[in-house]
Image (tube, coloured by chain):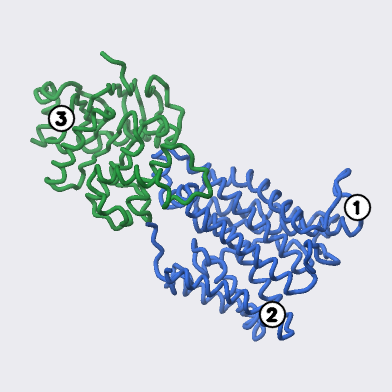
Chain colours: A blue, B green
Amino acid sequence: MTRETTINLLLALLLLGAPILAASLGEPFYVTLATRIAVLALAAVGLNLALGLGGLLSFGHAAFFGLGGYVAGIMATHAFNAEPLFANIEATTSMPLIWITAIAVAGLVAMPIGAISLRTSGVYFIMITLAFAQMIYYFAISWPAYGGEDGLSMSMRNAFPGVNTAKPLPYFLICYAALMAALLLFRVVEGSRFGSALQAARQNGTRVAAVGIAPFNIRLVAFALSAMITGFAGALYADLNRFVGPSMLSWHMSGELIVLIILGGKGRLFGPVAGAMIFVFFEYVLGGITERWQFLLGLILLGIVLFARGGLLGLLSGKPRHV
Amino acid sequence: MSEPVLEIRDLRKSFGALKATDGVSLDLRPGQIHALIGPNGAGKSTLIHQIAGSLKADSGTIRFLGQDIGGLDMAARARLGLARSFQISSLAQEFSALRNVMLAVQARQGNSFRFFRQVTSDNELTEPAMAMLERVDLAARAHVPAAELSHGERRQLEIAIALALSPKAFLFDEPMAGMGPEGSKRLTSFLDGLRHEAPMLLVEHDMDAVFALADRISVLVYGRIIASGTVDEIRSDPDVRRAYLGEAA
C-alpha cells in the first residue's frame, strides 16, 4: 500500500467516524458539519475530474451545483403543493429519482456549454465557463416562480426509501455513501482508456491528436461527466440545507470548489476530501473567531500555491507516478 | 510505377509576406524513403505540419491513399494512417514510456471511450506497447516517466509511438536531431528496415543518414523544391551544391 493510499484510508475513516461519534454524544451540529464536508467534497470530486485529470479549469461549476440544487428544490416544492411539474408529469420526493434528474439535467446543460467553451483554452476557457454560469445565476434571480433572489425553502427533506432523512446521521450516511461511490468512479475512470486519453490530453494535446485521438471529444465527455457529479452534489446540498438559492449558482461557489481542490491536491483521488475538510474546519473554527477567516484561508492558499503545488496530499505523500 | 501513398500538389502557405511553402509538389511512393533536405528556415517543418494537419495550407492539395485530406484535422489524419514524429519531442511527460506507447496502441485499436477496464492490467495494451519498446531498445526504461528519459531515449520513444500506430506512412521530422554519432548510426539502420512497413517522408540534417537511407531526395530552399531526384542526381546537381551542400560539405 502506498503512503497516499494509507492517508486516503485514514481520511475516509475520519470522515465516517467523527460524525458517528458526535451523534452518539448527542452533538448533531457536528454531524451536519461532516455532511457539509462530504457534499462539498463530492462536488469537488466532480470538478477534479475536469480540472485535475483533464486540466480544464472550469470557473462555472457552480452552474451544475446550483442546477442540481434547484432540481431538488423544485421537485420538493411541487410535490409539497401537489402540483404536477409539467402537463401531467408528477413531482416526486424520492431522492433517487431526484438525483437521476439532477445528474441528467447537469449533463444535458454541460454538453452545449462544454462544446462551446472547449473551443477555447486557458484564460478564455475560464471566462466562458464563468459567463455561462453567470447567465444561469441571473436567470435564477429573475425567475420569481422559484423564489428569485430569495431562493426556495423546502419544508422538509426529500425521502429515501427505508431511511429517516430528517435525522442528521442517516442523512450524513447517504451523503458519505454518495461521496465514496463518486471516489470509486473517479479512480476507475482515471485508470481506464478514457482516463489515459484525458490525462494525456492535459499533458500534451498535440501528442494525443498525433496518435489519432481527438482531444476535444475526450474533454467534452469529461466535462459532462464532471458536471453530472457536481450536479448530484448540488441536489444533496439543497436537501442538507433544506434550501436552494442563487448563491449556489454564484461565481463564489465556483471559486470555492477550485480552492477546495487546490488545498487538497489537484488531480489526486482524495484531494477534494482533504480540501473540503480544511475548508469547512476553517470556516467553522476561524469563522467563530473572526469574520475575516477567509483572509487566513487566503494566506494558506498562497502558501500551498507557492510551496506545495500538490496540495495537502502532495505535501504528505509525495509525487504521484504513472507507471 | 505504383500509385503514390502521399501526393502533394502545388501546396502554398504564407506567414504575412514570408512564403514558407511556395508551390511544393512531391510524391511518396510505397517502399520509399523520401528525404526532404534544405537549409534552416527552408520550410521543411512547415511542410510536415501541413501534411500532418497541425497547420492549414493556404492552397494546394494533399492526397493520402487517394483521398484528399486537406480538410481533416490532425487526429483524423493520424487515424487514416499518417504517423509523425516531432522535431522537438512531444510526449505525455508525466506518463511512463510504456504508457505513452499504450496510448498509441489504444488509439490504433480505435476506442478511447472505455471507462472501466484498467489500462495497466490490460494485456491488449501492455503487450503490444512493450513489443514496440523492445523494437527500439527501450524496454529496460519502460516504467520511467517520459520527462526523466534522456534526449536520445525520447527520440526512440517517439519512434516506438509511431510504430505502434501501424501507419500507412511515416512523417519523421529530424529523428536524429541531437543524437550522438553512435545513436545516429543505430537509428539509421533501424529506419532503413522500416521502409518495408510503410514509406517514409524524412526531414533530416544528418547528410550521412540521408545519403544512406533515401531512395529519393527533394531539396527545399525558401519554400520551393529546387531539385528532386535520386541520391546521385542530387549529389551532382550544381544548384543544390551551391544552395546547400556547398556549405555543409
From the image, tell me which residue sits under label 3.
Answer: B243
Q: Is residue A4 left or right of residue A283?
A: left
Q: Mark 1: which amino acid?
A: Glu
Estimate the x, y position of residue A12 in percent, counting from the top left: 57, 71
Estimate the x, y position of residue B212 in percent, counting from the top left: 13, 31
Name the residue located 42 percent from the left edge and 21 percent from the top edge: B67
Which chain is indicated by disc 1?
Answer: A
Co-location on one chain, circles 3 and 2: no
Answer few, some or many: residues within 10 Å of disc 1's Cα (few below 14, many 20 plus, some between 14 and 19): some
Question: Residue A323 occupies which quadrant of the picture?
Answer: bottom left
Name the residue located 76 percent from the left edge and 57 percent from the top edge: A70
Q: Nearer the viewer, residue B122 or A22?
A: B122
Q: Mark 3: which amino acid?
A: Ala
> Could you give the CA–CA distance between mark 2 and mark 1, rounded to whole angstroms?
36 Å
Question: Residue B42 occupies which quadrant of the picture?
Answer: top left
Which chain is indicated by disc 3?
Answer: B
Q: Does B132 sit above or below residue A151?
A: above
How many labels were placed on the picture? 3
Instruction: Tell me the element at label 1.
Output: loop
From the image, tell me which residue sits under label 1.
Answer: A83
Q: Quarter holding the N terminus of chain B?
A: top left
From the image, tell me which residue sits under label 2.
Answer: A30
Which chain is indicated by disc 2?
Answer: A
Q: Residue furthest top?
A: B1
Q: Mark 2: which amino acid?
A: Tyr
Query: In this orientation, does residue A53 appear?
Result: yes
